[in-house]
Image (cartoon, grey):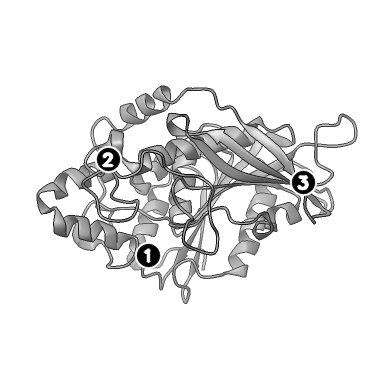
């Protein structure tokens, strides 16, 4: 399906952008204008068709953020023999880290570079560990997890730093000599989809976005939070701190994916799973409807949250090939043939 079902297409979002939203983000990004200091350390390994770089850069507050940069061979800067390639900056789901470079070979196989970015503090207890701490740590009052850290103040909220990290991750991709600065995309599922929306909204050089089941969209009403992780952490916060609920919702409004979508201008491909019990189809539809740039959506009637979906991966590849052209020059589509 390439259109929203009628019941979602006609539903109105509950989100209301708070006064001073744009000023908040201008001030936040201006306050984080410290040197990026990217480090790209080529890492030996078994890959014959790509080079792997162990990357770090200065994120929010100058904290070091880890990433993998995987570049297909023979892409590079050598004049006359090699060309720069597109790059897909990939953000991760809640609790995930960058894991191993071998986990991220789709885009290099297509002929594009990819930058796989840790989310600060996450990735310690799953199959994809991370290498990036969150030096700020606990920000009371909170319940265990990340989504309620600093929830009473937009300036101290966990996702304030995570969004800054995402913007600076795009800047890191742009800084590498093998990457075409006109063809940098952002991508992610769930939390990663939210971070992709934030990067597309807050960084003016993002050329395309792949947004799959984005998290934290249309969260103006705490009674709509599903009792599923990680929304369960928000429910527990409201349960334990009911006198703070209004302040918490005001903070969340500064990070809502609907507000970010309404400020993003690059072409985007969304994915919506109608059986999603974590990021409700209504919340994903709200982000899609408010997206300000050219947009497409794939609706999967029988899919749940973040389930493997090879058909959608194919749709994403086709979308970026149409937007960026064929980086490998083997499909008859010139590089940059249909940029928009």
Q: Residue at 59%, 37% (x, y): give it.
A: 56
Outermost residue on the right side: it is 81
Find numbered disc 3 in the image and state the secondary structure of the residue it sits on.
loop
Please provide percent x and percent y for residue 264: 46, 40
Please provide percent x and percent y for residue 63: 47, 34
What distance separates the C-alpha of mark 1 from that of mark 2? 21 Å
Outermost residue on the left side: it is 243
Q: Can residue 340 be seen in this view?
A: no
Instruction: Classify 34 as above or below 327.
Output: above
Find numbered disc 2 in the image and state the secondary structure of the residue it sits on.
loop
Give the class, few, some or many, for how many residues have Cα within 10 Å of label 1's Cα (few <14, many ≥20).
Answer: many
Q: Is residue 271 left or right of residue 38?
A: left
Q: Provide the residue designation for mark 3.
A: 327
| Front residue of 171 and 294 | 171
Please provide percent x and percent y for residue 109: 75, 56
Q: Provide the residue designation for mark 1.
A: 281
Count the labels in the image: 3
Q: Residue at 23%, 62% (x, y): give it.
A: 224
Give the class, few, some or many, for how many residues have Cα within 10 Å of label 2's Cα (few <14, many ≥20).
Answer: some
Please provide percent x and percent y for residue 247: 17, 43
Q: Is residue 63 left or right of residue 55?
A: left
- Answer with mark 1 or mark 2, whichever residue precedes in sequence: 2
Find numbered disc 1 in the image and state the secondary structure of the residue it sits on.
helix
Q: In this view, does 324 lie to the left or right of 154?
A: right
Q: Residue at 65%, 60% (x, y): give it.
A: 103
Q: In which quarter of the image is the C terminus?
A: top right
Q: Provide the residue designation for mark 2.
A: 17
What distance separates the C-alpha of mark 3 from that of mark 2? 39 Å
Q: Can residue 79 be seen in this view?
A: yes
- Answer with mark 3 or mark 2, whichever residue precedes in sequence: 2
């Amino acid at each position: 399906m390439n259109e929203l079902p009628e019941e979602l297409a006609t539903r109105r979002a509950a989100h209301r952008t708070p006064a001073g939203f744009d000023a908040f983000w201008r001030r936040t990004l201006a306050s984080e204008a410290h040197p990026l200091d990217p480090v790209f350390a080529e890492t030996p390994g078994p890959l014959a068709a790509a080079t792997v770089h162990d990357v770090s850069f200065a994120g929010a507050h100058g904290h070091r953020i880890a990433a993998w940069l995987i570049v297909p061979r023979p892409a590079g800067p050598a004049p006359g023999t090699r060309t720069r390639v597109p790059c897909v900056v990939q953000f991760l789901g809640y609790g995930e880290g960058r894991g191993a470079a071998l986990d991220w070979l789709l885009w290099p196989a297509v002929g594009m570079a990819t930058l796989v970015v840790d989310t600060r503090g996450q990735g310690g207890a799953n199959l994809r560990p991370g290498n990036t701490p969150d030096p700020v740590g606990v920000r009371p009052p909170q319940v265990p997890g990340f989504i309620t850290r600093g929830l009473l103040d937009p300036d101290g909220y966990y996702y304030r730093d995570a969004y800054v990290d995402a913007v600076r991750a795009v800047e890191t991709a742009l800084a590498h000599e093998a990457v075409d600065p006109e063809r940098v995309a952002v991508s992610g599922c769930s939390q990663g989809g939210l971070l992709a929306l934030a990067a597309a909204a807050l960084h003016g050089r993002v050329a395309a976005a792949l947004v799959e089941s984005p998290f934290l969209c249309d969260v103006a009403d705490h009674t709509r939070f599903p009792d599923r992780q990680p929304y369960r952490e928000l429910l527990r916060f409201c349960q334990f701190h009911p006198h703070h609920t209004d302040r918490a919702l005001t903070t969340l409004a500064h990070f809502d994916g609907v507000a970010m979508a309404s400020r993003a201008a690059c072409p985007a491909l969304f994915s919506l799973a109608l059986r999603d019990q974590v990021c409700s189809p209504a919340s994903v539809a709200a982000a899609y409807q408010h997206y300000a740039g050219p947009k497409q959506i794939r609706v999967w009637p029988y899919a749940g949250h973040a389930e493997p979906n090879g058909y959608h991966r194919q749709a994403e590849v086709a979308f970026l090939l149409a937007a960026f052209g064929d980086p490998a020059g083997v499909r008859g589509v010139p590089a940059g043939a249909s940029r928009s």
